[in-house]
Amino acid sequence: MINVGIIGGAGYTAGELIRLLINHPEVEIDFVFSTSNAGNNITKIHQDLVGSLELKFTDTVNPNVDVLFLCLGHGNSVKFLSANTFSDTTKIIDLGNDFRLESNKVFTSTGSTQIKTFVYGLPELNKGAIVNANYIANPGCFATAIQLGLLPLANAGLINNDVHVNAVTGATGAGTSLSATTHYTWRDNNFSYYKPFTHQHLGEINQSVNQLQNDFSSEIIFMPNRGNFSRGIFATIYTDFEGTVEDAKAIYKPFYKDAKFTFVSDDFLHMKQVVNTNKCLVHLHKHNNKLLITSTIDNLLKGASGQAVQNMNLMFGLEESTGLELKGTYF
Amino acid sequence: MINVGIIGGAGYTAGELIRLLINHPEVEIDFVFSTSNAGNNITKIHQDLVGSLELKFTDTVNPNVDVLFLCLGHGNSVKFLSANTFSDTTKIIDLGNDFRLESNKVFTSTGSTQIKTFVYGLPELNKGAIVNANYIANPGCFATAIQLGLLPLANAGLINNDVHVNAVTGATGAGTSLSATTHYTWRDNNFSYYKPFTHQHLGEINQSVNQLQNDFSSEIIFMPNRGNFSRGIFATIYTDFEGTVEDAKAIYKPFYKDAKFTFVSDDFLHMKQVVNTNKCLVHLHKHNNKLLITSTIDNLLKGASGQAVQNMNLMFGLEESTGLELKGTYF
Amino acid sequence: MINVGIIGGAGYTAGELIRLLINHPEVEIDFVFSTSNAGNNITKIHQDLVGSLELKFTDTVNPNVDVLFLCLGHGNSVKFLSANTFSDTTKIIDLGNDFRLESNKVFTSTGSTQIKTFVYGLPELNKGAIVNANYIANPGCFATAIQLGLLPLANAGLINNDVHVNAVTGATGAGTSLSATTHYTWRDNNFSYYKPFTHQHLGEINQSVNQLQNDFSSEIIFMPNRGNFSRGIFATIYTDFEGTVEDAKAIYKPFYKDAKFTFVSDDFLHMKQVVNTNKCLVHLHKHNNKLLITSTIDNLLKGASGQAVQNMNLMFGLEESTGLELKGTYF
Amino acid sequence: MINVGIIGGAGYTAGELIRLLINHPEVEIDFVFSTSNAGNNITKIHQDLVGSLELKFTDTVNPNVDVLFLCLGHGNSVKFLSANTFSDTTKIIDLGNDFRLESNKVFTSTGSTQIKTFVYGLPELNKGAIVNANYIANPGCFATAIQLGLLPLANAGLINNDVHVNAVTGATGAGTSLSATTHYTWRDNNFSYYKPFTHQHLGEINQSVNQLQNDFSSEIIFMPNRGNFSRGIFATIYTDFEGTVEDAKAIYKPFYKDAKFTFVSDDFLHMKQVVNTNKCLVHLHKHNNKLLITSTIDNLLKGASGQAVQNMNLMFGLEESTGLELKGTYF
């Protein structure tokens, strides 16, 4: 059994990890760390787990767990690892954005000679490296959806013009803290956007596209929207493409033929096809000179905790889909 | 023109009052008081009013307004009136619950001999008294819906058994402050209840039923629920009734024949029939010995600010429906 | 492996069965029968299954499957079994209401001497009989939630007064056919009821209460409501009860101590605690002489397809929870 | 009083017209025509009007009404006008798309010499022509939102590059007929698109942009989305622009300085700022070389029936905003 520790246990992604891991046949949850909730039952926060779990939040870590999931706000993973020491054999999967970029991928503990180098954990891009990694930077949610829409085209060296991306995410994308735009009366039946053209996930998206197409020099223009739903990301992406839609499919389908969770659909997509699953569905459509790529995921699963478990499975030599064959909600 | 001051200007009911009063032909808004927002444009908070209103929140009152609306949290109207003095001719409409019960209806200012006696402002019950009142205690939202369902039966002296009430309200019923149960991710597609059998509106409901049927001695058993919508109250009420549904209609229709906003519908109701209107719709259904009374209102309008304007119209000798012929949302 | 056939494959409960069974380790789906969709991919209707399932709807049955699930509109199971013959060893689980009442539990094929006697498939009530049954009448969704709220009290012989039930169900409760009240523009942010006091599930509820408390002679007064969500049932039930809430818990907790999916929670409940799980959560609260029992389930899982699989597991000697340890949606 | 006839009375836009016109001080509704509902109370369909309106649907027209609103499915206005004759003085406002394009703007009755020439009824573009028109082609909903975002820039001759538009509409945009994508269980908490790059409103948008900037030769790339709400359109539009955001405001604010319902907001927008109003709010934002224009309306009001009444007011010499100072829903 893989012994697991979870840091930042009261948030959405930690809750999802717990939901996944209690049914994972090879995992035992060793501890769930939350300073603000220490001593309380986990079901006090993750209330759907009544009947499923008898465990309390703790403020003490076990430094010898096999794997540690960091579910902290952005910037806090570095702080946490600086303040806490774990066994050299403890693998780490960081769900925050501290180590996703090449420029930030190395962590050096103060007062230690050990250097941790994080691998960007998108299995469809880096499976070989993930299998051999000890430290994983789990991709962002929007970044996952958008990359899975773009990477096959980048791999074919065919992104030669500006890429226009419009994507919408649910209220869980904004975290558990209360804010004006997550108040029910504001968000119910509403629509808006935030950080137009400047979303922080653009960095990792550009990095991955460049990894596969190193002459890529176009711009990715990204409008992130807030939808009135709790879970899910639906992204539409278009760029100029000379071939037919069949040409595009001939690029995408082979690229994902061994992917466990990413599938190319021949039909138009809607977001609820993937909610509460670890899937990414991709659809291709051509109009005039534009290739329209649709990509949809559950932001908390393939966009966060599900992908983290997928990475864990790869790192520990398990079947990639272990514990991730989820029943979708659909309705 | 009637000069109006609004106290507690950043909340939901104040926002609704402003929305109503800017289109009211006999009203001018003199000031909107909000200490926390003083100096800011009102549109900073009530953002739908962009283009409709150029006015700022203030922390200074004009003590000579014709009418003052108190839109404060429960208990704060007494505090505000104790700390602020207004002209003897300033009428006051309190949307809180400080003065609704007979036992609390009198307010005496410290260091003053003036006594203010509040009239319970449900026009269908107390129109004569409202017309002559200077101080109005505006009814609670649940209390309005439930009373309008029960009062004709009480008036006929026919509530002789326990009354079972189940009602659901939207997230605006919980006020603007952020809380776990108004977070979008919690409330979206959810259902729950609060304060089972002990909701604070039971006091005013019992008081009004007793006003019309003074031998009333049964219990009103009230389950208040939280629905996943922003506006509206839908109440189902049943009690034993010996007559037919036609007998019941013969009691209800005359009772409401002159009501401007309360109507008896012969068809089953759904809540969106009244959203964004000042209406109350009532329906009667009989099964075996039970009379099922359905009553539905918009909690912010007939359940709060709309009724407050209706009371103002009556107090100032205007046509009761002035400024309240609203276009419903319906969808 | 258990070979499964599903009849009425295009509806909600069939879809849920397929979602459950593709991940069930002991099951193989032999065929999914739908005359209107025969020849089409199942993913044409159950679109979230893209990537999970390569199977087409058929209009031909395999009469030798190990178990047959009937997912037909009420009244159609009798018709289907009259028109189609299956092996004597084929077990049948009917998700409709044709065989739930004692008066209807026997099915006799025309031109055959074989008699099929259906057992009412509520594991918390009839586990022993289910284990030995070949034919199961799966309970109704409202009926499951309400019975799980009432049965411990009935078992203690303590339902001695009228029982008041108010419950709300989602739009999947109304079936896949399009109707005015399932149109998005009608149902969004709306609330209403239907069949007040006369819902068809009252028959099976009364039958089960009587099975445990044979002197039960009170009335169950049931208001079924339509909520603006897709999945879930939230039921509040109250009746007179002389003891304390601790007395009530001392009745309920032992009753459910071996239940795999029904749990007594000490905290107030909300519906999303059970959505997309096979759980039923029950809460007890006392006020004056009233015991308030809250019971919440997912109408499509514990209220239909999940319970059907639970019954299948029991009938085939499997661990009761096989394939039913689902990741909840929660948000 | 203006005598009004409404054709296609059971649909969404007819319902909205009735909601508006019953409170319009200068209008009397003469008849509401609906062959399928003739003889029924209007409140049978538009159920929120209980208490507001005592009128029945009819299948007989009064050919002498002052103004006729056509609320028919696209293509049906021509058919209706071919089959029915009205007085030469009857003005007509068509809410469908039959007469919006220059190439289709003339209607010639069979067996008559009278020619009707329709003016495109966007007041912000064509007020002078509308005031003098007898026949109005009311703009499409998406077309209104997008044009109001683009026209000031076109007027300045500054649309010199491709225009990227992403817009989302609610379920009322799809009409009252039941379909898979308007079923509650499908649309609730979902997101999708339709007619990518080929929406029929592109024709009128291009036509109006060309009217103001006759050298316009770029492409408008339009992705129309389906949101999970009932009312509203939220459009984001971007194109290259050399100036600063202040330069852009200096173009937009004067353009709309006399507009009664279109306002430029300095703050980021969200859709509920305009729901249940006749407003259009426009916001400008600059990032690098891109000007981001946000435009939001209520699809049934400024996008349909509200604009139709605005046109009627102009045609009859009334104050443009008569009957259109609506209380927004906001929550």
Image (tube, coloured by chain):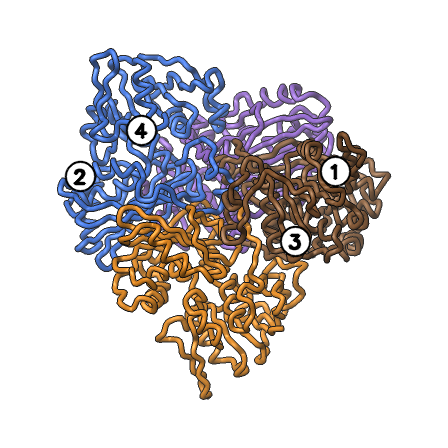
Chain colours: A brown, B blue, C orange, D purple
Which of discs 3 and 4 lies nearer the camera? The answer is 3
Q: Quadrant of the C terminus of chain A?
A: bottom right
Labels 3 and 4 share a subunit: no
On the image, the x and y values in percent for residue B138 come to 29, 30
Which of discs 1 and 2 lies nearer the camera? The answer is 1
Which residue is tagged 1?
A: A100
Chain containing mark 4: B
Looking at numbered disc 4 in the image, what kind of residue is underneath it? Ala
Tag 3 near tag 1, CB within 8 Å = no
C-alpha distance separating marks 3 and 2? 63 Å
Question: Helix, strand, or loop for circle 3?
Answer: strand
Residue A209 vertical position relative to residue B91 in the rendered view, above or below:
below
Which residue is tagged 2?
A: B210
Labels 3 and 2 share a subunit: no
Tag 3 near tag 4, CB within 8 Å = no
Circle nearer the N terminus (3, 1): 3
Local packing at callout 3 (Cα closer than 10 Å; few below 14, some 14-19, many 20+) is some
Which residue is tagged 3?
A: A27
Chain containing mark 3: A
Mark number for residue B308? 4
Local packing at callout 2 (Cα closer than 10 Å; few below 14, some 14-19, many 20+) is some
Which of discs 3 and 1 lies nearer the camera? The answer is 3
